[in-house]
Amino acid sequence: MRWLIKGATLTENKELLVQYLLGNLSEEAEERLEQEYFLDQEKWIALRAAEDDLVHNYAGGRLSDTQRRQMEASFLISPRVQARVELARLLLDLQECRQSGCRSHK
């Protein structure tokens, strides 16, 4: 797979995808990225994985204040994303409950 930024590391490319999802790229950079992931299934999968990580990190309170505000202002306006965040929160609560021996979730 050719990466989104030629010669960049996996981490650098993942950060680019997160910046895209948070609406931090220029219009030109967004268009280039969209062309790439629409033409390359592996890049599409990488984008979906970055989205999953972003939702999970938001639900778990692991984003910086800036990223949290950006997510709430742009990415979280989608009802689909809101539902994914709620599901992630429920799953995190269930995991925490099971680890602590909580009996209210079975």
Image (cartoon, rainbow, N blue to C red):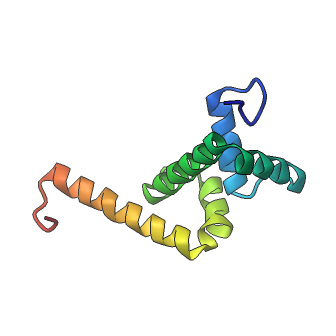
Does the image show residue 25?
no
Query: Outermost residue, bottom direction?
Result: 79
- Nearest to the observer: residue 49 or residue 15: 49
Where's the C terminus, which quadrant?
bottom left
- Number of callouts in the render? 0
Residue 76: percent from left, percent from top: 59, 68
- Left or right of 81 on screen, residue 15: right
Q: Residue at (84%, 53%) from the top-left corner?
A: 31
Q: Residue at (67%, 26%) from the top-left corner?
A: 9
- Nearest to the observer: residue 37 or residue 97: 37
Residue 61: percent from left, percent from top: 46, 55
Query: Outermost residue, right direction?
Result: 28
With respect to residue 87, does 18 lie above or below? above
With respect to residue 66, does 105 lie above or below? below
The image quadrant of residue 79 is bottom right
- Left or right of 95 on screen, residue 102: left
Where's the N terminus, which quadrant?
top right
Does the image show residue 104?
yes
Q: Residue at (33%, 65%) from the top-left corner?
A: 90
Residue 20: percent from left, percent from top: 72, 52
- Nearest to the observer: residue 76 or residue 40: 40
The image quadrant of residue 4 is top right
